[in-house]
Amino acid sequence: MTYARMKSPHMQVGRVEGTFLRILVKLARARRVLELGTFTGYSALMMAAGLPDDGELITCDIDQKAEALARDFFARSPHGRKIQLRMGPALETLKTLQGPFDLAFIDADKQNYSAYYDAVVPLLRSGGLLVADNALWSGRVLQPRAPEDHALVAFNAKVAADPRVEKVLLTVRDGMMLALKR
């Protein structure tokens, strides 16, 4: 349905990345997960599948058309009951949340990645994992031109310079930045 109903279906996390996220949730023994950027819900469902039965995933988005599809997918999945979808600007929603979270996944508007990082890291527990999608941005981080390109370059530099985390940039799909909070 994502490909049939959405303008930019390529924004959906793919099967490999979704499986990787589910495995990361399991490896982290996560009970609470935070996601910024729900789109139609595939990544949320994959991560929820890695949570224990009493686990919780809070996902944030602003797109009402995508929200309707995501809620439909959540309702049809046995893992959908673990997911809370919060609508509204993520930076505002983050102000209402209390940590600790075990894992956070950032896959929303690229220009706010640095601001999301600043807001999310304090919500992670020590040993918590932050995962950010699109860190390589189809190679455009090497020769940035557009505002989104520059925003991702700044985000990557921010994470690289942050002594609060151990980090690695993986070449999975469009680049996944992993940052483990000390």
Image (spheres, rainbow, N blue to C red):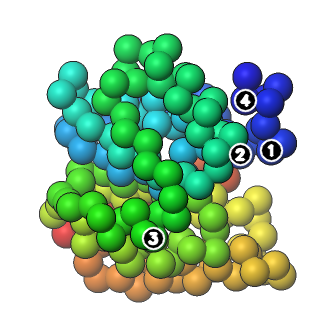
Tell me: 5 left or right of 177: right
Residue that mark 4 sits on: 2
Is residue 107 in sight in this rendering? no
Looking at the rendered image, the disc whose residue lies closer to the viewer, 3 or 2, is 3
Q: Nearer the viewer, residue 11 or 168?
A: 11
Counting labels gives: 4
Q: Position of residue 134 (x, y in %)?
A: 63, 58
N-term-proximal mark, 1 vs 4: 4
Q: How far from the left and from the top, in percent, is residue 58?
A: 36, 46
State whether residue 72 appears in this view.
yes
The kind of residue on which mark 4 rests is: Thr
Question: How far is mark 3 from mark 4, CA to CA?
Answer: 26 Å
Report the residue marked by disc 2: 11
Secondary element at image label 4: helix
Query: Looking at the picture, which amino acid does disc 3 mark?
Result: Leu
- To which residue does mark 1 refer? 8
Q: CA distance from mark 3 to mark 1?
A: 23 Å
Cα separation, mark 3 vs mark 2, equals 20 Å
Q: How would you rate the neighbour count of disc 3 (Cα within 10 Å): few for under 14, some for 14-19, many for 20 or more? A: some
Q: Nearer the viewer, mark 4 or mark 2?
A: 4
Q: Amino acid at mark 1?
A: Ser
